Image (spheres, rainbow, N blue to C red):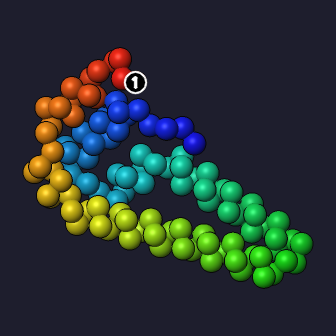
Amino acid sequence: MKLYSDRVLARNLLASSSQGFTIRGHLQRQRRFYGLVLAYFLAVLLILAALRLMPLFWLFLGMLLGFLLREWAWLGATKRSWSFVSRTTDWARVRAMADDSASG
């Protein structure tokens, strides 16, 4: 996975600042990541089911469900804390980081 630069993260934060943090907006910005994770897990699950390795199938299915539950909990916590984050963030500095061509 590619590591995000400060510029990319600042732009994502600015996108959230203009409309507030929404779960839908986050999922749209991270669709490639979630798509790759789901594709990996579905491929492994299909292979395990085809080979009839059911204990491993259920293990990987549990891992996938655990991942999705953890992400959902994180998104909910982020949404609940957004009003505090938006009040305490130095938006001028974030805008400067988003516009800085040297960092990205």
Q: Please tell me how crowded label 1 is: few (under 14), some (14-19), or many (20+) other residues with Cα within 10 Å.
A: few
Q: Nearer the viewer, residue 90 or 22?
A: 90
What residue is disc 1 on? 104
Q: Quadrant of residue 92?
A: top left
Residue 15 visible to an observer of this rendering: no
Question: Where is residue 34 shown, x and y percent of the image?
Answer: 54, 54
Question: Where is residue 88 shown, x and y percent of the image?
Answer: 11, 49
At a point 29% along the width and 61% down the height, the residue shown is: 78
Amino acid found under the numbered disc labelled 1: Gly
Question: Where is residue 65 shown, x and y percent of the image?
Answer: 56, 74
Residue 100 visible to an observer of this rendering: yes
- Helix, strand or loop under label 1: loop
Question: Quadrant of the image for the C terminus?
Answer: top left
Q: Does 9 sit left or right of 38 as displayed?
A: left
Q: Nearer the viewer, residue 60 or 42?
A: 60
**Residue 81, placed above or below residue 55:** above
Q: Nearer the viewer, residue 6 or 31?
A: 6
Q: Quadrant of residue 48?
A: bottom right
At a point 49% along the width and 38% down the height, the residue shown is: 3
**Residue 14, placed above or below residue 101:** below
Q: Nearer the viewer, residue 65 or 19?
A: 65
